[in-house]
Amino acid sequence: MKKPKIAIYGFTGCSGCQLEILDLEEALLDIFNMVEIVNFEMVGIKKKPLPRVDVSFVEGSISKEEDIKKLREIREKSRIVIAMGACACFGGVQGIRNFMDSKEAARAAYGIDDCPRGSTEKISGIDEYVKVDYYLPGCPIDRKEFLQLVKKIVLGRGLKPQTYPLCVECKRKGIVCLLDRGILCLGPIVRAGCDALCPSLNRGCEGCRGMVVDANLMEQIEIMKKMKFSKEEIIRKLRIFAANQFKEVEKYL
């Protein structure tokens, strides 16, 4: 059986999702036995020109004009493109820049008077420029979810994302609702798939997996208002990881 060819690429981000792959340790050897990794710069596997592959995992948001050209080449040479992590899926933490004055953002991030030359007008996930076949969200990704996804690719199975909110996983694990305990949690509007990691540690979900389809954003905002959060605090908390998904949040306030 011919091994699927896989490439892993990174754009703007902390590279935490790629590190999660390396942290699979012994399980990583299983991946090498199942697939042929033909590009993974973090471990020194780098091909030029970019290779044709079955699957490309792409980490990081698009923040530079030069990234767009490379991303489009990745898409052209990949049968399947998977957005890996909150940055690639939604723009990530740096997407907050889209709702700030560019000079203000540059001073806050770099201590300079304007964004570096060649920066894009806005920070975006990769689907702003290319077709994405599957989204693997999280900040960082769940390494077990990545491993399961690779196995499905090898077996030729369909890639089905979770379509239900995090609250479902809390119920399954018997976690008492954090909102009922007075702890802010975005679980009702955020996509599941992390096995309720943060609520399991008595921490509210901050939304790194992005908003679930048909999320009741208005009700979530009403809950936050009842918890005495100001308009500015609500906006900041909703826009931590997936700011672009909450670009119209002001109209609910």
Image (spheres, rainbow, N blue to C red):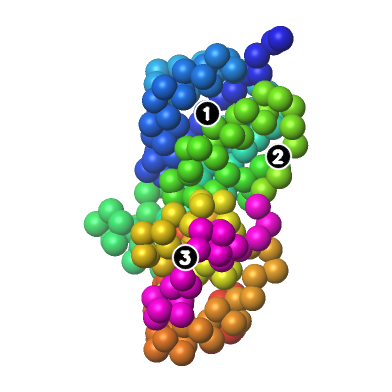
What secondary structure is marked by label 1? strand
Q: Position of residue 55 (x, y in %)?
A: 64, 27
Q: Residue at x 28, y 53 (%)?
A: 110
Within 10 Å of the Cα at label 3, are there few (<14), some (14-19), or many (20+) other Cα atoms?
Answer: some
Q: Give the numbered dot on residue 8.
A: 1
Magenta-colored stretch includes residue 96 = no
Which image quadrant is residue 248 in? bottom right
Tag 2: amino acid: Leu
Asked whether the residues under the numbered discs 1 and 2 touch, taking CB atoms below 8 Å apart as contact, a structural biologist would say no
What secondary structure is marked by label 3? loop
Q: Residue at x 68, y 63 (%)?
A: 213
Q: Of callouts 2 and 3, which one flags the residue occurring earlier in the amino acid sequence?
A: 2
Q: Give the numbered dot on residue 175.
A: 3
Give the residue furthest to the top: 1
Q: Which residue is mark 2?
A: 159
Give the residue furthest to the front: 174
Quadrant position of the N terminus in the picture: top right
Front position among marks 1 and 3: 3
Tag 3: amino acid: Ile
Within 10 Å of the Cα at label 1, are there few (<14), some (14-19), or many (20+) other Cα atoms?
Answer: many
Q: Position of residue 246 (x, y in %)?
A: 56, 69
Highlighted range, magenta: 162-183
Q: Position of residue 37 (x, y in %)?
A: 54, 18
Q: CA distance from mark 1 to mark 2?
A: 18 Å
Within 10 Å of the Cα at label 2, are there few (<14), some (14-19), or many (20+) other Cα atoms?
Answer: few
Q: Is residue 60 visible?
A: no
Above or below 135: residue 151: above
Tag 1: amino acid: Ile
Above or below 185: residue 230: below
Q: Is residue 89 visible?
A: yes
